[in-house]
Image: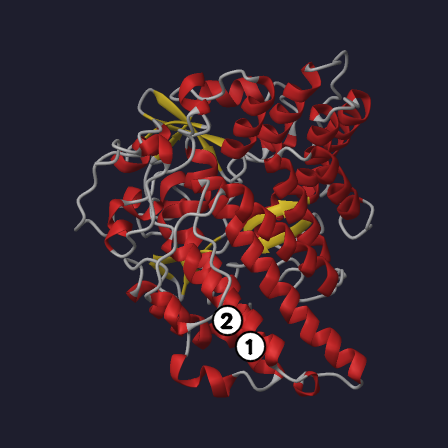
Amino acid sequence: MKSKYLLTYTIVLVLFATSCRKFLDQTPVSTPTDATTWQADGDANTGVAACYSLIRAAFNASIGYYAYGDLASGEFSNSDQPDFQKVIDFNLGAGVASTATDNPLLKLRLWTPFFTAVAQSNRAIAFITAMPTAVFNGTSDAEKLARKNKYLGEAYFTRAFCYFTMARIWGDVPLVLENTDATVAQQYARSPQGDVLKQAIVDVNLAIQYLDWKDNGSSDRVVRADKGAAYALLAHIDAWKGDYAGCNTACDAVINSGTYSLTAAASFMDIYKGQSPESIFEIAQNTLSEGYNANVSLTLASQTLTAPYLNGTVPVWHINNSYVTKLYTDTADVRLKKGFISVSSGATSFLECVKYTNIQTVNNNVTLKVALNNIVIFRLADIELLKAEALSSGPSGDYNTALSLINQVRRARNAKALTGLSGTAVIQAVTDERGRELFLEGHRTFDLIRLERITKDQQFDNVTPGEFAAGKTYWPIDPNLFLNNSKITQTPFWIGKVN
């Protein structure tokens, strides 16, 4: 998404902001003109671009992408912000005043932003399907059809991505596939997670059918979905389901495409600036029209960075120093050497993750700094290690190939090869390597959930095995959502535990 879409995004986000307290507010982006707007290629392009914009808004709300995926994983020991401390402690049902609309815990318990994005995907699917092929750009009927299919593929991808995201966070969620104004008033019950993921797989397979691979010369490479992004999403859905045969096949499609390459050790930090040769799918925010004010309290930059990047001497989210020391045992590992610095406050030292330091001052105004790091969702190292998980955790137990994939990633990071491992020890090694490779990239909590399912070993300090089996790692929904929908119920573990 480039700056020419800024006006469209602004309209979309205004609508999102004014409806954030409603359940499944699916008021179209342009209700009075929907029937007359979807007339040309540019209309479809803009409509699909809005899907990505709304996903970005959902992830940026209370730093959701990292709060859900990292904050409770053990990467952080504590937070100076009390509500984020509750996430670290897995105290997800802590009381929040209904009037505290800016409270991060309340926002994290609302799935409304994701359903707003789903609504836009539903809208795009419905209207683009109805558009005549002749109105799309191209010099032949085949080119025009390919153009139409590209937009449809992106819309199916974004819907699948949203539902996969929500399924990992809340488990069972309402499944809404139709595009109609009446859905604002209709009541939806939570659909079983299995049904939600089944639909996500249907959607992502349609995306695979409709989308092509993109070459490195594409200006919108990785910030808009292509066939590689769709296969990567399918691999993650299959891994979450425990379908490691399917996961392995989808990983192979990405790896064997020849489209992506591991970033060299010397350029490791370039991954987080966006659109590196390693990246498969990202949420774009590396331009001024897409970035966010780094000084606002509820941003990743404000919680994790200090001077010279932002004001302050101590990160608000405190990295667990012993956790990092245990995870990174090779001091030559570029992920440790370049990804962290040590800062001090008095006699206390703090580790600071500096992956997301692409901060730009606007018009030389030191009080206005914009964070311009893309949200890196899928990249090649992630998929290679996910394949290693599939091989080591699946019924065949191909531990040698799994270990070779781990060492392939380690070589690219200047880390020594792992040797002498066999059997189930390789499963743990895979998860550890993912922890090193994907620190603060939105994966760790979900990786540990999958690991505990496989090994039955407790992975979270604040979740006992009994609580894990009862579903404590799935988030509660905020009680405010019940006001507009009498059919939904609380997440099972959290019934009677949300104040």
Residue in view at x 25 percent, y 45 percent:
479
Q: Residue at x 64, y 36 (%)?
A: 239
**Can residue 151 be seen here?**
yes
Quarter that holds the N terminus:
bottom right
- Residue annotated with mark 1: 127
- Circle 1: is it few (<14), some (14-19), or many (20+) Cα within 10 Å? some
SS at mark 1 in the image = helix
Q: Hey, which quadrant is residue 484 in on the image?
A: bottom left
Front-most of residues 341 and 134:
134
Q: Is residue 66 above or below residue 120?
A: above
Amino acid type, callout 2: Arg
Which type of secondary structure does the marked residue at label 2 adopt? Answer: helix
Percent across and percent down for residue 347 are 33, 20
Relative to residue 426, is residue 462 drawn left or right?
Answer: left
Q: Do callouts 2 and 1 mark residues in contact (Cβ within 8 Å)?
A: yes
Res 211 visible: no
In the rendering, at what x and y percent does residue 350 appear? 40, 27
**What residue sits right under mark 2 in the picture?**
123
Q: Give above or below for 348 relative to 302.
A: above
What x and y, as percent, mark residue 165? Answer: 51, 47
Q: CA distance from mark 2 to mark 1?
A: 6 Å
In the image, 88 versus 469, the foreground residue is: 469
What scheme was used to colour the molecule? secondary structure
Q: Which mark is residue 411?
A: none
Residue shown at 39%/84% (left/top)? Answer: 32
Q: Count the marks: how many?
A: 2
Give the quarter of the image for residue 312: top left
Q: Is residue 280 above or below residue 141?
A: above
Type of amino acid at the residue the image marks with label 1: Phe
